[in-house]
Amino acid sequence: MKPTGPIPPYFTAPGPLAIAGRAAEDWAADRGTPLFVYDQAIVADRIATLRAALPPAVEIHYAIKANPYAPLLAAMAPLVGGLDVASAGELDMALAVKPAAHISFAGPGKRDAELEAAIRVGATLNLESEGEATRAVAIADRLGITPRLAVRVNPSFELKGSGMKMGGRPSPFGIDEARVPALVRRLIAAGADWRGFHIFAGSQALDTAAIIETQRATVHLARDLADRAGAMPPLVNLGGGFGVPYFAGDTPVDVTAIGAALGEVLEPGCAYAIELGRWLVAEAGVYLTRVVDRKDSGGETFLVVDGGLNHQLAATGNFGTVVRRNYPVMLARGGEPTETVSIVGPLCTPLDRLADRIAFPRADVGDVVALFLAGAYGATASPARFLGHPDAQEVLA
Ligand SMILES: *Cc1c(COP(=O)(O)O)cnc(C)c1O
């Protein structure tokens, strides 16, 4: 038997499970499965908790790639200071709910049409290379528009203990620290509206002390680069990287401690942002599937459910994890565990395993299985077309 991750504190085990005050089984019966349910009250609670913890000079930005479901974006937009996007498609989604002045566009390989779209509407481009800077300035000149340009820095340090490291090494993201001051001077000389720095050192970190240390280093780096460039950044985007507890033994980050430590190092008169994806939305989402088959093989019991890695790749351990471990999962109608089962999706590949040898109540065909932490990197981060099954439904509750 293998452990499962902790069920987010917003839900009660052993059940029956309710999502936004309604039985999970009712959601499944009403909307059909597979189904993602996102509870907007949980997202609002996360944002309020973080807002209360952070110094007032720090804006909260949402990195929409974590979950760009339009009704969720519309609900979140008034609650956050900015939206961070990484494609022209995401830019359009963000513009539907937020003024361009509060949208920044990062990501390598922005095509000319993407640079032009951002410049036309007045979104901030987080430049990822000198070449991109040259193209952006040329496009803005041709359009006769002053572009809003920030410089993404590839820091010489990394966020320790993060699941995905983004700094301290050769990188497709950002411009190496040493070359940043010259680029900032060049942008200002070209007449651009220089918007500041974007410094993102890693993702999915649960080590509060490491996040504090990285943020301190990031603030210092921004000041040092500003000194060398001879210009004050209007905004310093400190990145984010706050993780959520997916697996057994994981504990949440202490945002109160992070906010207090940040308050001690911020430069007066400078504006800051923290950009988060999963920390804001992961716990608000539950992925509901229905048991299609129950079978025994070689002494093991398998529950085969109607959706899997085609919708929730991350839960199968195939999205940025080295060792496959179990997400939190429960039988929607509740019950105490009485047997050991593996829960697999309907895809014809052994990769499609949602839970591996877990303790579970007796479940039969027709029962609803709930996978937690499905609010981030679910529907849009999974290979939906692989094997031709239907898309999952989504609903904002
Ligand atoms: C993906 C990404 C984020 C969000 O990461 P999370 O781990 O979901 O918080 C934030 N900023 C940038 C630049 C990103 O690429």
Image (cartoon, rainbow, N blue to C red):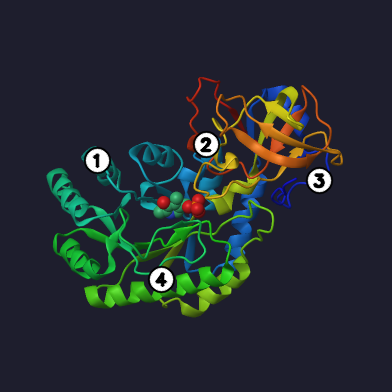
Q: Are marks 1 and 3 in contact (CB under 8 Å)?
A: no
State the residue position of label 1: 111
Q: Residue at x 65, y 58 (%)?
A: 250
As drawn, 238 above or below 326: below
| 251 and 90: which is toward the camera | 251
Q: Residue at x 20, y 64 (%)?
A: 183
State the residue position of label 3: 13
Q: Which of pointers 1 and 2 indicates the residue nearer the eye?
A: 1
State the residue position of label 4: 218
Q: Earlier in the sequence, mark 3 or mark 2?
A: 3
Q: Earlier in the sequence, mark 4 or mark 3?
A: 3
Q: Earlier in the sequence, mark 1 or mark 2?
A: 2
What amino acid does circle 2 point to? Tyr
What amino acid does circle 3 point to? Ala
Q: Is residue 178 visible?
A: yes
State the residue position of label 2: 69
Q: Residues within 10 Å of mark 3 (few under 14, many from 20)?
A: some
